[in-house]
């Protein structure tokens, strides 16, 4: 097996990025979609200087000293506009979210005043304006809020709605299929026959595919049989833009995936990557249909899918950062090692990382706990605790 570097393999994958179609949809239908065009704010937020508290809108110059006496000339609530400006010695009753009347620049909260009729007396003196949300402090009109290729998360949808944008251009989902190979696999939740194991890879890969703008149109299980694999390839020939194969990727007697796709007319683009986990990963293409061949071990298949799906789908690749390693690491060998790890921000604001003790590619619990991959380059020298290492972030930081 001829191995190429991870960078070379990712470059080849990028050259075979799947074509996507942009469509316009309503905001309420956009969850989980991939943006095809940046989103720009249609309004300022806040649209005006707003009160952050219930209290009184005043001129700061009038309340520098405690026991200031001010005349209440009206009130304003959220959703209203003030009907007059305030002048020296005046104030206006105001509620959270309401626009400040012209002339005011500070809010005295209601707990810090004594009111009698149309007059208040302030209990404190103030040096700086407080409790005002400044116009445009969140974002200004025409600001770019979210860029092309971004996954539309719940928080992103809220931001877009706040920007007064009701329709978006997103990419139509790519059609993806997962082809699972292995006589030992059974669906989870049933009594297992002797020698069988619950199939788990397709569940994680399905979620990963959706996060990269794909609809999973089929998940097929095939035995270690050329006939079964070839039949599945034919059945998926018109229904999927991208096929992920899982298992049968190595060179054993029962590893038949790649030969069957070759027989079906797929041209191999690369076959084997100098990385662990995931050495047997391969890529093939026939017409507009692309196949990413993944190893069968759970960590290997999931990690390699994380590494290559962004380049095939045109989404954002894993973010690479430098971090301080919390443990000693041995010198690395002839394949780049991607170590499943836990990364977090320490009390000093520094990104730190620690690999899990077990790096077995069949260990799913470690995969589920990790949020980073430590990159150990080919022939990398030993690392001491406190040294800097490169990491790929795969999840949220703590």
Image (cartoon, rainbow, N blue to C red):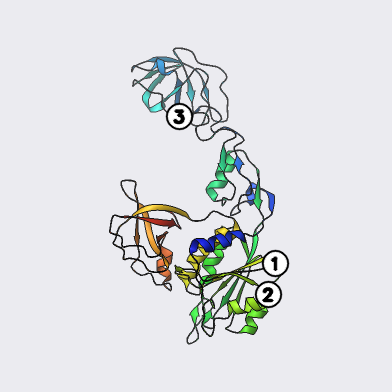
The numbered dot on residue 164 is: none
Q: Which mark is residue 54?
A: 3
Q: Nearer the viewer, residue 222 or 324?
A: 324
Residue 356 visible in the picture: yes
State how far apart marks 3 and 1 are (Cα). Answer: 64 Å
Q: Secondary structure at mark 2?
A: loop
Q: Position of residue 238 (x, y in %)?
A: 71, 69
For label 2, the residue is 265
Task: Using a 10 Å C-alpha cutoff, classify the residue at mark 3 as few (fewer than 14 neighbours), some (14 to 19) or many (20 or more).
Answer: some
What is the crowding at mark 2: few (fewer than 14 residues within 10 Å), some, or many (at least 20)?
few
In front: label 3 or label 1? 1
**Could you tell me residue 342's position as x and y percent?**
37, 59
Q: CA distance from mark 2 to mark 1?
A: 9 Å
- Name which of mark 2 and mark 1 comes first in the sequence: 2
On the picture, is 305 further left or further right than 323? right
Q: Nearer the viewer, residue 134 or 38?
A: 38
> Which residue sits furthest top?
88
Q: Which residue is mark 1?
A: 287
Per the model, the C-alpha gap separating discs 3 and 2 is 71 Å
User: Residues at badges 3 and 2 in contact (C-beta under 8 Å)?
Assistant: no
């Amino acid at each position: 097996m001829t191995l190429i570097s991870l960078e070379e393999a990712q470059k080849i994958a990028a050259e075979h990025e799947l074509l996507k179609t942009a469509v316009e949809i309503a905001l309420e239908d956009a969850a989980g979609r991939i943006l095809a065009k940046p989103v720009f704010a249609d309004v300022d937020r806040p649209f005006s200087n707003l009160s952050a508290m219930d209290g009184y809108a005043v001129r700061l110059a009038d309340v520098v000293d405690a026991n200031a006496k001010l005349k209440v000339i009206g009130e304003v609530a959220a959703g209203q506009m003030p009907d007059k400006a305030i002048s020296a010695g005046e104030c206006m009753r105001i509620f959270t979210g309401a626009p400040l009347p012209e002339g005011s620049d500070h809010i005295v909260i209601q707990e810090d005043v004594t009111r009698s009729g149309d007059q208040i007396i302030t209990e404190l003196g103030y040096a700086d304006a407080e409790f005002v949300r400044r116009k445009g402090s969140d974002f200004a009109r025409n600001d770019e809020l979210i860029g092309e290729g971004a996954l539309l998360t719940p928080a992103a949808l809220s931001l877009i709605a706040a920007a007064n944008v009701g329709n978006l251009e997103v990419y139509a989902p790519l059609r993806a299929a997962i082809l699972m190979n292995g006589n030992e696999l059974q669906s989870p939740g049933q009594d297992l026959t002797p020698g069988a194991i619950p199939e788990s890879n397709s569940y994680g890969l399905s979620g990963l595919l959706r996060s990269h703008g794909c609809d999973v149109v089929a998940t097929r299980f095939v035995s270690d049989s050329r006939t079964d694999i070839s039949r599945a390839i034919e059945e998926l020939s018109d229904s999927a833009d991208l096929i992920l194969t899982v298992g049968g990727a190595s060179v054993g007697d029962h590893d038949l995936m790649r030969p069957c796709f070759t027989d079906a007319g797929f041209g191999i683009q690369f076959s084997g990557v100098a990385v662990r986990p995931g050495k047997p990963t391969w890529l093939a293409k026939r017409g507009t249909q692309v196949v990413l061949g993944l190893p069968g071990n759970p960590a290997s298949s999931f990690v390699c899918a994380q590494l290559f799906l962004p380049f095939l789908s045109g989404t954002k690749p894993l973010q690479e950062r430098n971090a301080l390693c919390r443990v000693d690491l041995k010198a690395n060998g002839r394949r780049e090692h991607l170590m499943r790890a836990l990364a977090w921000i320490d009390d000093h604001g520094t990104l730190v990382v620690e690999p899990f003790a077990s790096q077995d590619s069949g260990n799913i619990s470690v995969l589920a706990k990790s949020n980073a991959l430590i990159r150990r380059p080919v022939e990398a020298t030993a690392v001491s605790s406190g040294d800097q290492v490169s990491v790929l972030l795969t999840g949220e930081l703590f």
